[in-house]
Amino acid sequence: MRTPLSGVRGLGSAKEGVAHWRAQRLTAIALVPLALWFVISMISMVNSDYQTVVAWMGSPLVAAMLVALIVAAFHHAQLGVQVVIEDYVHNEGIKLASLALAKLVIALLGIICAVAVLRVGLGN
Amino acid sequence: MTVQNRPLSPHLQIYRPQLTTVLSISHRISGIFLVLGMILLTYWLACLASGPEAYRDAYALVHSLLGRVVMFGLSFALFFHLCNGIRHLAWDAGYGLEIEQAYTSGKAVVAAAVALTLVAWLVALT
């Protein structure tokens, strides 16, 4: 529906407005405990063999928290990279292409991680 | 729309670096470095999901000398970004916005990041 508001939504430097800002803060809050848990887990398994790591990931709770970590981290990373690109790339065409590429690549990496975790966690 | 090269007033050439500005750009740099780390994480998880032989390669890479150096840098980047990120969240909630408070919290963030990195590696290596 073509209202005066719909015509201007998305324009201007704010683009999507506060949604980006909120998502960045929300993923950040989620990442504080998730990232600490991940680091502690990795340190505890620093010299562990394949079977030990696989067994650890076999726990449904661990697999779920890893997926939560992956979603939060990759979304947070995408938002952060977006801000950096918007700050330093001024050619509109290159900027849009870079933003699209960054979003897609980060999304793909996140999907690869999530699939790997589910594959190991659910048992090959 | 192209960028015309209009003259800019000097900034980096004349402003003395302060704790606030240095930590701000460090937060961004550590964030970018962590994105690279996430690529490494993707490789590690993909190797894990591909079986013991593939995992052995990932393990060897991480435990090599270069791997350990990179992991040390990544761990410090993570702890710094985490601690400074909490500092940012406090600002977003409206706390600690005075200059003296920003300097105090800034020093606390650097100290915490260094301490966490050292403790983490001490535990990991023993």
Image (cartoon, rainbow, N blue to C red):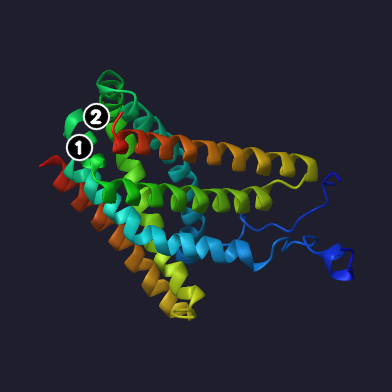
Mark 2 and mark 1: span between their CA atoms?
A: 21 Å
For disc 2, the chain is: B
Q: Residues within 10 Å of mark 2 (few under 14, many from 20)?
A: some
For disc 1, the chain is: A
Instruction: Name the residue rendered at 18%, 30% in the picture.
Output: A51
Q: Amino acid at mark 2?
A: His
Residue under label 1: A55
Q: Nearer the viewer, residue B65 or B53?
A: B53
Q: Quadrant of residue A11?
A: bottom right
A78 to the left or right of B113: right
A9 to the left or right of B106: right
The answer to whether marks 2 and 1 sit on the same chain is no
Q: Is residue B29 visible?
A: no
Which mark is on residue B63? 2
User: In the rendering, at what x and y percent does residue A52 appear?
Assistant: 17, 35
Q: How many marks?
A: 2
B68 w.r.t. A29: above or below: above
Q: Nearer the viewer, residue B42 or B124?
A: B42
Instruction: Name the residue rendered at 24%, 45% in the picture.
Output: A59
User: In the rendering, at what x and y percent does residue B93 appear?
Assistant: 48, 78
Q: Please tell me whether mark 2 or mark 1 is closer to you in this view.
A: 1
User: In the rendering, at what x and y percent does residue B73 appear?
Assistant: 34, 42
User: In the rendering, at what x and y percent does residue A58 appear?
Assistant: 24, 40
A111 w.r.t. B6: above or below: above
Q: Nearer the viewer, residue B121 or A81?
A: A81
Q: Amino acid at mark 1?
A: Ala
Q: Residues within 10 Å of mark 1 (few under 14, many from 20)?
A: few
A91 to the left or right of A67: right
